[in-house]
């Protein structure tokens, strides 16, 4: 494989969720670093479960790559990548730094495992859009699907999301990934989602290459209907199968493949 020419950024990728987006990976470690080890993760198994937030990428090193970008038409600059972005202690500095250079909106895709922390909430408040994972309505489903670090609990995640909702004025989306092992949890998840009050809910299933099979459209459609009926018109509910998916044309293919896996055929 060619050596990546970008160390901390990837894409742009075209996402069914947020359009044309340049990815920023504020963790960027060779050993996958996350607070979860989701069974469907396209990056592979988690090797490092950090005990606390830390600086993985110096802010200035990231900003140097951002300043060197060619002319690009983008909808978002999105923090995501090879691990959990809120593990980066300098996430807030990075968002502020990018805002001083680029005009695009900024999104953060997070597994919400640290969202009960005040410092994490303060960093996330700086973004225009937060996409937060919620794949379970009980500790058992959380363990089966997301394999979290032992100290992480569903109660803390849900309470953290509710607390964050109260202070956050941007666009909050809940992302729910359905696979065979949590499809029976749809009613429980929708009930938590109604308490959190997101603007939007994305119903997903893993279409990129990973260790588990996606649910077919005929199984995801009734789940999507449960969410629509329970949430009403006030919440936009979108399903991956109803959305147009386009091929991406990244600046650097190796740095993008490493974080995103292969595009579905
Ligand atoms: S939270 Fe994201 S990066 Fe972490 S294991 Fe799950 S899918 Fe992978």
Image: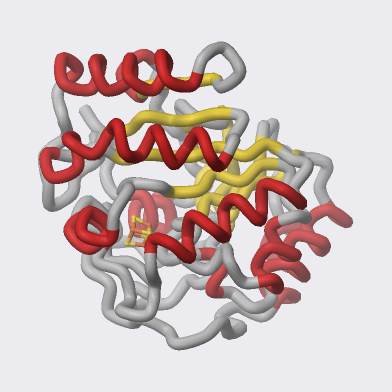
- Residue 107 picture location, percent across and down: 64, 46
- Residue 135 picture location, percent across and down: 33, 46
Which is more toward the observer, 82 or 37?
Answer: 37
Quadrant position of residue 197? top right
Q: Residue visible at 70% across and 51% down?
A: 69
Q: Residue visible at 56% across and 12% down?
A: 233
- Residue 33 picture location, percent across and down: 38, 75
Which is more toward the observer, 225 or 128?
Answer: 225
State the residue lying farthest toward the right: 100
**Horizontal side of residue 144 vs 247, given as left or right:** left
Quadrant position of residue 179? top left
The colour mode here is secondary structure
Q: Residue visible at 67% across and 32% down?
A: 75
**Horizontal side of residue 131 vs 41, given as left or right:** right
Task: Give the position of the C terminus as an image quadrant.
Answer: top left
Quadrant location of ligand 1?
bottom left
Which is more toward the observer, 253 or 87?
Answer: 87
Task: Give the position of the N terminus as an image quadrant.
Answer: bottom left
- Residue 182 picture location, percent across and down: 19, 42
Above/below status of 95 relative to 197: below
Above/below status of 216 relative to 154: above
Count of picture labels: 0
Q: Residue visible at 78% across and 57% down?
A: 98
Above/below status of 261 relative to 223: below
């Amino acid at each position: 494989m060619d050596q990546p020419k970008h160390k901390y950024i990837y894409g742009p990728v075209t996402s069914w969720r947020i359009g044309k987006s340049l990815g920023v990976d504020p963790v960027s470690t060779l050993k996958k670093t996350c607070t979860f080890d989701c069974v469907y993760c396209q990056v592979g198994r988690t090797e490092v479960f950090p005990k606390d937030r830390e600086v993985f990428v110096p802010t200035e090193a990231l900003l140097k790559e951002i300043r060197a970008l060619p002319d690009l038409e983008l909808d978002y600059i999105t923090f995501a990548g090879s691990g959990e972005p809120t593990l980066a202690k300098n996430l807030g500095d990075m968002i502020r730094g990018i805002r001083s250079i680029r005009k695009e909106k900024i999104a953060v895709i997070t597994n919400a495992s640290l969202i009960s922390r005040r410092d994490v909430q303060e960093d996330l408040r700086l973004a225009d859009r937060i996409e937060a994972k919620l794949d379970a309505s009980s500790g058992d489903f959380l363990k089966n699907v997301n394999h979290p670090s032992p100290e992480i609990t569903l109660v803390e995640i849900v309470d953290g999301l509710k607390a964050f909702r109260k202070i956050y004025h941007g666009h909050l989306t809940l992302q729910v990934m359905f696979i065979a092992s949590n499809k029976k949890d749809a009613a429980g998840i929708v009930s938590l989602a109604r308490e959190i009050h997101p603007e939007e809910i994305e119903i997903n299933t893993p279409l990129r290459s990973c260790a588990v099979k996606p649910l077919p459209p005929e199984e995801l459609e009734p789940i999507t209907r449960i969410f629509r009926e329970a949430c009403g018109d006030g919440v936009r509910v979108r399903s991956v199968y109803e959305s147009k998916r386009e091929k991406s044309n990244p600046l650097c293919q190796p740095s993008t493949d490493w974080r995103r896996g292969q595009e579905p055929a």
